[in-house]
Amino acid sequence: MLNFAATVDVRIYQPVDKHPAIFKTFESLAQGETMELINDHDPRPLHYQFIMERPDQFEWEYLEQGPTVWRVAITKK
């Protein structure tokens, strides 16, 4: 079982605020720490953004994949 340093439930944010909140939380993680992302849809575009902006700096693991809730563990390398 993963031990999360932070959880970001972006379902409570306005769309424009979701990615900034996620990246702010990711930046606050120490190396090796993991955050939990909770969303109401597949965060695939966010995954692509991580790949483009933070290559080789994270690990991405789906914990739950819908149909109403997606949970992802994002670990800072």
Image (cartoon, helix red, strand yellow):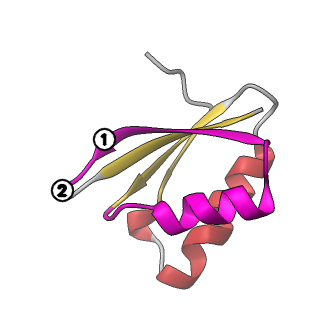
Q: Is residue 27 left or right of residue 4?
A: right
**Cα gap from disc 1 to disc 2, whole angstroms:** 9 Å
**Which quadrant holds the C terminus?**
top right
Residue 68 falls within the magenta-colored stretch: no
Residue 62 falls within the magenta-colored stretch: yes
Please name the residue that numbered disc 2 is placed on. Answer: 67
Q: Is residue 56 left or right of residue 18?
A: right
Determine the residue positioned at 20% across, 58% down: 68
Mark 2 crowdedness (10 Å alpha carbons): few <14, some 14-19, many ≥20 = few
Mark 1 crowdedness (10 Å alpha carbons): few <14, some 14-19, many ≥20 = some
Q: Nearer the viewer, residue 35 or 53?
A: 53
Residue 33 x %, y %: 70, 28
Q: Is residue 36 above or below residue 22?
A: above
Over which residues does the magenta segment extend? 40-67
Q: Nearer the viewer, residue 22 or 53?
A: 53
Indicate the secondary structure of the residue bearing disc 2: loop
Determine the residue positioned at 47% across, 73% down: 13
Residue 20 x %, y %: 67, 70
Residue 40 x %, y %: 31, 63
Residue 65 x %, y %: 29, 47
Give the amino acid at mark 2: Pro
Q: Nearer the viewer, residue 9 or 45?
A: 45
Q: Residue furthest left?
A: 67
Please name the residue that numbered disc 1 is placed on. Answer: 64
Determine the residue positioned at 79% across, 42% down: 57
